[in-house]
Every structure is written in C-alpha cells, then in structure tokens.
Amino acid sequence: MAIRIRSKFHAGGRERSMATLASVAAMLAWKLSIDSIKRMREAKFDIDLGRPYFDFVCESMAFYAHIADRVAFGKLETGRRGEFTTALALRMADAIEENADMLLEAPVPGECRSHFLDLFNQAGTDYAEFGYGADGPDFGFRRCFAARVREGMPEKDKTWVYDQVMEIEAPEGVKAIGRTLAGLFAGTDR
C-alpha cells in the first residue's frame, strides 16, 4: 500500500525546529505501523485488536524511532540529533496515548504513553549493539526487531514472523523513513 508522506515543506527558506521535524516523522511512523499490521494480517498473521495490536504498534514505532535516530546521526550535529530523537520519542508516545482507545479497551490515562517510552528505552538498549549503514539496518538489527515482535505473536505465528518482519516490514518502513528524513533534513546537514 502506498502511504502519502511529507518529505519537504512547501514554504521553503526557513529552518524548522527539531520538534516540527520529529512530529512529521512520528506521524509517518504511525502510518507505517498501521500499514504494516494490514500487510501482516493479509499474510495470515493473527494480530487481534486489543493488546496484540497495541504491542505491535508500539514495537514498530520504537523500531522506526531508532531508525530515524540512526539517520539523524549521519545528518545532524550531536545536540540537534539528541533534540530530534527526544522530540520524536515524546511525539510518538503522545500519538499512542491519543489513540489509546483505538488500541486498547478503557486504558488508564497516561499508561500507554508511559508504556511506549519504557519500550523505546528498552529497544534502544537492544538495538545499540547493531549497525546501520548505507543500506540501512544490518541483519542483526532487523532480526532483533523481528524477535521483539515475535514475543507478542500467537504460538502458531512465532516461527514465520521472522521472515515477514525482516524481509518485508522492516525494509518498507526503513525506506520510507530514510526518504522522508533525507528531505526533511536537507539543509541541516553537518
């Protein structure tokens, strides 16, 4: 499925804040996560509404946040990268909280936001061991993402989830994040 994404602003010439850029990337990650669930369901993976759906969205968005951070590493100065990644994680957490009623039945206010931020930090520890090059995340990075997704899958899907996530879901999202951030970071290069 094609996702419409913003990769540049029409009113050129003025510099955007890292929070503004992070907001665009966060909304893209949200769309990519929902699109990924649709593809997973079409491939006959059971991602039911409720907790499985919520867990998949959170894992996907945390992965995309860390991909965006790696892209920012190559494009932004250290301080601006930190500002961007912090704003991105917080905006993603807000998006999950704002859509909590879609993801979970009767969530406790603030619980989804807090859950995502904890997950983002845990994922960062796991993903820190792996490389990110010109071709995107290395095999270990993608496999780690697949392993994290696998934990929320029903037993019947656990064997096959690696192939789907590593070969279809991760590359699609990485490509979209990379294209978008290349356009958004244009003019902010190191």
Image (tube, helix red, strand yellow):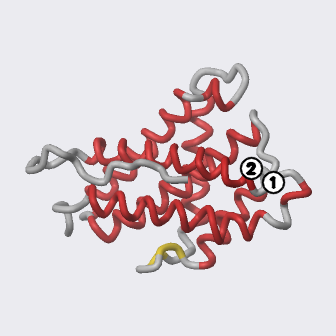
Q: Which mark is residue 156?
A: none
The residue type indicated by label 2 comes to: Arg
Tell me if 121 is positioned left or right of 105 in this view.
left
Q: Position of residue 127 (x, y in %)?
A: 57, 66
Where residue 76 appears, x then y in whole percent? 26, 63
Instruction: Say what amino acid the circle numbered 1 marks.
Output: Lys
Please give the name of the residue rendered at 80% of the width and 53% of the height, measured from the top-left corner.
45
The residue wearing badge 1 is: 44
**Residues marked 1 and 2 touching at CB (< 8 Å):** yes
103 and 93: which is toward the camera: 103
Which residue corresponds to the image point at 47% horizontal and 50% vertical from the top-left?
A: 3
Of the pair 72 and 34, the residue shown nearer to us: 34
Position of residue 83 relative to residue 138, above or below, is above
Tell me how far mark 1 sits from mark 2, CA to CA. 5 Å
Q: What SS does tag 1 mark?
A: loop
Q: Secondary structure at mark 2?
A: helix
Instruction: Classify residue 115 by image quadrant.
Output: top right
Q: Residue at x 61, y 65 (%)?
A: 126
**The C terminus - image quarter:** bottom left
**Residue 106 at what x, y percent from top left?**
70, 19
Horizontal side of 90 relative to 52 (left or right) equals left
Q: Is residue 18 left or right of residue 39?
A: left
Residue 186 position within the rendered picture, expressed as x and y whole percent measured from the top left: 21, 62
Please give the residue where the numbered disc 2 appears in the rendered image. 41
Residue furthest right in the image:
156
Label 2 Cα neighbours within 10 Å, binned few <14 / some 14-19 / many ≥20: few
What is the residue that sits farthest to the left in this orientation? 13
